[in-house]
């Protein structure tokens, strides 16, 4: 065996054999511009089968970890007035650093990302209520990120149970009627998920 490919079990290995056979036992090191690149092994990981994500949609990492399979699409035009879209940017923060990618932080003016659309990949309604609960929890987590406790957040606080506990503890305190967020009418895209527009805070 060449050991260049790892499988979850014998059944998967047998299924892949026709494709893998021509590559099996070939050289495990290659030369690139005079330097030898040794074979590198990484731990196997499970990749769930998923529908293709339509062009322009980006996965929101923290909401996914909280059990809300949220995607965001930007570039739907400018808002009627420039609004700092902190809430939309928070959907894109990195689970460990607490920072959103640079292209989500800025633009011509820091934090202005234009109109965005949010959609759930599981087909559930993307409501203003869910959006506000996500923002409230991520806002709460920012205290931990600013204290340099991002790894602790990622390890202990980014799961559906912690999110549900937070929402329950804040019952009656989360504002669902804030200005400049228009969830509009739920609209279904071609993948069957529902989406809502988000305009900012």
Image: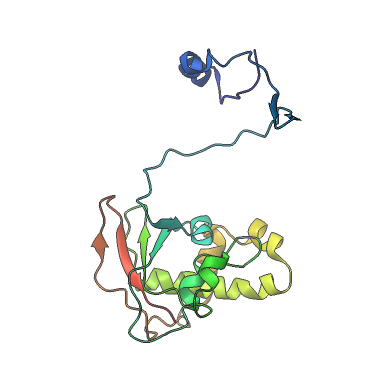
Along the line of sight, which residue is nearer the eye, 24 or 71? 24
Residue ID at (35%, 77%): 78
Q: Quadrant of the C terminus?
A: bottom left
Give coordinates of residue 30: x percent, y percent: 68, 25
Give coordinates of residue 106: x percent, y percent: 53, 74
Coloration mode: rainbow
Q: Would you say 137 lies left or right of 181 here?
A: right
Give coordinates of residue 83: x percent, y percent: 43, 84
Q: Quadrant of the N terminus?
A: top right
Along the line of sight, which residue is nearer the eye, 167 or 178? 178
Q: Is residue 105 above or below residue 83?
A: above
Residue ID at (33%, 57%): 124
Q: Would you say 197 lies left or right of 16 here?
A: left
Quarter of the rendering containing residue 40: top right
Q: Is residue 103 above or below residue 21?
A: below
Residue 110 visible to an observer of this rendering: yes
Along the line of sight, which residue is nearer the eye, 178 or 51? 51
Residue ID at (70%, 32%): 33
Residue ID at (67%, 70%): 145
């Amino acid at each position: 065996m060449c050991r260049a490919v790892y499988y979850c079990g014998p059944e998967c290995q047998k299924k892949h054999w026709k494709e893998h056979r021509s590559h099996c036992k070939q050289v495990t090191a290659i030369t690139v511009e005079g330097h030898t690149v040794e074979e590198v092994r990484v731990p196997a990981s499970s990749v769930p089968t998923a529908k293709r994500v339509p062009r322009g949609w980006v996965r929101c990492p923290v909401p996914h970890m909280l059990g809300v399979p949220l995607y965001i699409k930007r570039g739907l035009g400018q808002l009627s007035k420039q609004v700092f879209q902190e809430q939309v940017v928070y959907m894109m923060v990195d689970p460990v650093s607490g920072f959103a990618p640079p292209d989500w932080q800025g633009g011509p003016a820091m934090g202005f990302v234009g109109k965005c659309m949010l959609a759930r990949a599981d087909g559930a309604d993307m409501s203003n209520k869910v959006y506000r609960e996500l923002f409230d929890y991520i806002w709460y987590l920012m205290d931990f990120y600013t204290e340099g406790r991002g790894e602790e957040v990622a390890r202990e606080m980014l799961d559906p149970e912690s999110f549900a506990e937070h929402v329950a503890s804040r019952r009656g305190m989360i504002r669902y009627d804030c200005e400049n967020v228009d969830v509009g009418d739920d609209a279904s895209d071609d993948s069957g998920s529902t989406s809502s527009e988000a305009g900012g805070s």
